[in-house]
Image (tube, rainbow, N blue to C red):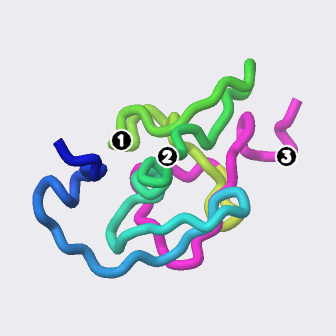
Amino acid sequence: MSGARQTPASLVGARPEAAHIIEFDGREIPALPGQSIAAALWAADILAWRTTRVEGRPRGAFCGIGACYDCLATVNGRPNQRTCLLPAQPGDTVTTQEGHGRADLAI
């Protein structure tokens, strides 16, 4: 068995276009054209980008279809964006969302 990491793209033999860069909490993350922000974060081994509003527990993508809202993040200054539904655009800035995602609602 080889030590190469398998990805969905490698499993189906896809040849995607070159990656572009998005920023997550100040860190540059490569994203493939058409890839959701959540998928780009997963590919970068980032599994949590939100904390719950009551206990501050980490959350990331769970359902992957926009139904559970666990993948909420602040994208380009807009809080409460479902990252599993948003295609990553070149230059997007994603930040970890805490609580409600609105400073005026913070406890």
Q: Extreme left residue here?
A: 12
Residue 8 lies left or right of residue 57; in this view the side is: left
The foreground one among 47 and 104 is 47
Q: Which residue is mark 1?
A: 64
Can you give x and y, in whole percent of width and height, for residue 62 in the image? 42, 32
Instruction: Count residues near mark 1 (Cα–Cα under 10 Å), then give few for <14, some for 14-19, many for 20+.
Output: some
Q: Which residue is mark 3?
A: 103
Which callout, 3 or 2, points at the residue further toward the start of the chain? 2
Q: Which mark is residue 45?
A: 2
Circle 3 SS class: helix
Residue 39 lies left or right of residue 100; in this view the side is: left
Q: Is residue 103 above or below residue 76?
A: above
The foreground one among 2 and 85 is 2
From the image, state whether disc 1 or disc 3 is nearer to you: 1
Residue ID at (57%, 32%): 59
Tell whether position 79 is magenta: no
Tell whether position 96 is magenta: yes
Tell me which amino acid carries mark 3. Answer: Ala
From the image, state whether disc 3 or disc 2 is nearer to you: 2
User: Would residue 77 be seen by someone viewing this image from the given angle?
Assistant: yes
User: Would residue 83 be seen by someone viewing this image from the given angle?
Assistant: no
Which callout, 2 or 1, points at the residue further toward the start of the chain? 2
Read off the magenta span.
80-107
The quadrant in which the C terminus is found is top right
Circle 2 SS class: loop
Q: Main secondary structure of the magenta part?
A: loop
Disc 3 to disc 2, C-alpha distance: 28 Å
Residue ID at (11%, 58%): 12
Residue ID at (64%, 39%): 50
